[in-house]
Structure formats: C-alpha cells, structure tokens
Image (cartoon, rainbow, N blue to C red):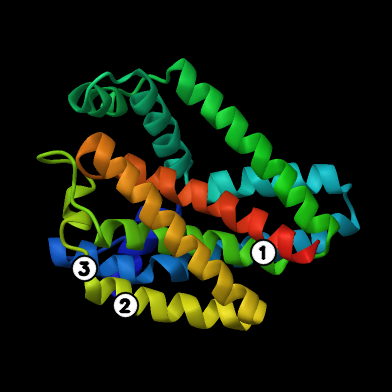
Amino acid sequence: MKRILLALQFLTVLPVRIRGEVSDRDKAGSMIWFPAVGLLIGTVLYTAGLYMPKVLPVTVTSALLLILLALMTGCLHLDGFADTCDGLYAGKSREDALNIMKDSRLGVMGTTGLICLMLLKYMLIKEIIAANALPALMLAPMLGRWAMVISASISKYAREDGTGKSYIDNTGIKELSIATVFTLALAFILKSFQGIVICLIVFTAVFLITHFFKKKLGGITGDTIGATGEIIEVIVLIALIAFVV
C-alpha cells in the first residue's frame, strides 16, 4: 500500500500522506504502479472528454483537458521537459548541461519547447475528440508513465545525488516486468492489437531517447524522465490518430 501511495504522491497533486520511513526500495517499488497512476489520470481525462463536448465547443474542451492534465500532475513533467530543453541546448559539456537543468530559472529554449509541446498536445487532443477516439486519453498518460519505468530500468542516474537517484538506481528488471505486464494487458483491453503495436513503438522510442540522454549526459535524471514521459504522450497520441485516420 505504501508504494501505491508513493506513486500517487510523486506523480499527482493528490494530498497523499505516507506513514513510516520510506526506503530506496520503496521508491523503486513504487514505479511498478506508475502505469496504474497514469491510467487513473487518463480515466479522469476520458470522463471529462466524454461529457464536456456536450456543453462546450471542441476547441474549449481540448484546452480545458490540457489544463486539467497539467494541474493533475502539478506540471512536474512539464518542468522536467523545459529544464531538459534548456540543458541540452545551452550546455556545451555534460557538466554544463546538468548544472543548467538544475537551475530553477527558465531559459529561452525551455520556454520555446514548452510552447511547442503544449500547442502540439492541444491540436492532438482536439483531433482525438473530433475523431471520437477517447480511449486515447486513457492510453497516452498510462504509456507515458510506463515510459518512465523503462527509462529508469535501463540507465543510471547522471549525477552523484539528487531527488531521482533513489528511484532510478534501484529500478530494475522486476519493476519493469510487472509494470510491463500491467501496461500490455490494459493496452490490449483499450485498443486491442493496436494497443500492443503502440506499446512496441513506445518501447523502441524510449530506448532511443534514453540512449540519447546517456550519450549527452552520461545517464538520466528526474528531468529527463519527465521529458521522456511528455514526449511519449505525444508519440502515443500521434500514433492513435494515425490508426484512426
């Protein structure tokens, strides 16, 4: 139960309280539940997307769903995406990039990246609603959180210490296997064999993205995990729209 609550606490703004000491193994074990939390977030989006268009225009509904997604996650992954954009663009060396990513100030590249990401997500959500492909709103957040588990399990932490170190360095095959079984099962239930194909696309994309981060930074960080989740959400929405069209 503690590990489920940890996943909820880390990935959402829900007022979750955890009693007792939290170990590094608990943090790593909580990653098993990341896809489940993603599904919970997606279910909220799906429900809102089901009823909002009945009283609001599609454009307004799309904007509200995008805002809802950001608010439910406390903009945590968006912050990681922006920091990653700043670090990779402005950092001339591995150390420079990591220092820039740790800086709380937002740079030009981070701002530009966020604008492009949010604009693209808005257009994709709008197309999903127009095509009446609402299960995509459940699948994208789930696969985005599964992507975080994949990335953490195949890489090491890029810094000597930090918030994400206990998660990343202690996540391995066991956590990945359990999270993957859950994800594949739900993907099949939601989108049949299309869901499995999209899972394969996601796994390949995460492997390539993580390899890129390892090459540039010597590993991954909490910021790059957030960035990976955001990128995968976009890839999933694009893939689902392609299937519908």
Looking at the rendered structure, the kind of residue marked 3 is Gly
Return the residue nearer the eye: 93 or 122. Answer: 93
Residue 81 position within the rendered picture, expressed as x and y whole percent measured from the top left: 44, 37
**Inter-mark Cα distance, 2 to 1:** 23 Å
Label 2 crowd bin: few (<14), some (14–19), many (20+), radius 10 Å: some
Q: Label for residue 8?
A: none
Return the residue nearer the eye: 163 or 216. Answer: 216
Looking at the rendered structure, the kind of residue marked 2 is Ser
Can you identify the residue that label 3 sits on?
172
Q: Residue at horizontal 23%, vertical 24%?
A: 99
Residue 128 position within the rendered picture, expressed as x and y whole percent measured from the top left: 76, 57
Can you identify the residue that label 1 sits on?
136
Dot 3: what SS? loop
Apparent side of residue 174 relative to residue 245 in the rendered image (left or right) = left
Label 3 crowd bin: few (<14), some (14–19), many (20+), radius 10 Å: some
Say whether disc 3 or disc 2 marks the residue closer to the N-terminus.
3
Q: Is residue 160 above or below residue 183?
A: above
**Inter-mark Cα distance, 1 to 3:** 28 Å
Residue 91 position within the rendered picture, expressed as x and y whole percent measured from the top left: 29, 20
Q: Is residue 28 above or below residue 1?
A: above
Say whether disc 2 or disc 1 marks the residue closer to the N-terminus.
1
Q: Label for residue 177?
A: 2
Dot 1: what SS? helix
Residue 155 position within the rendered picture, expressed as x and y whole percent measured from the top left: 23, 54
Residue 207: image quadrant is bottom left
Say whether disc 1 or disc 3 marks the residue closer to the N-terminus.
1
Looking at the rendered structure, the kind of residue marked 1 is Ala
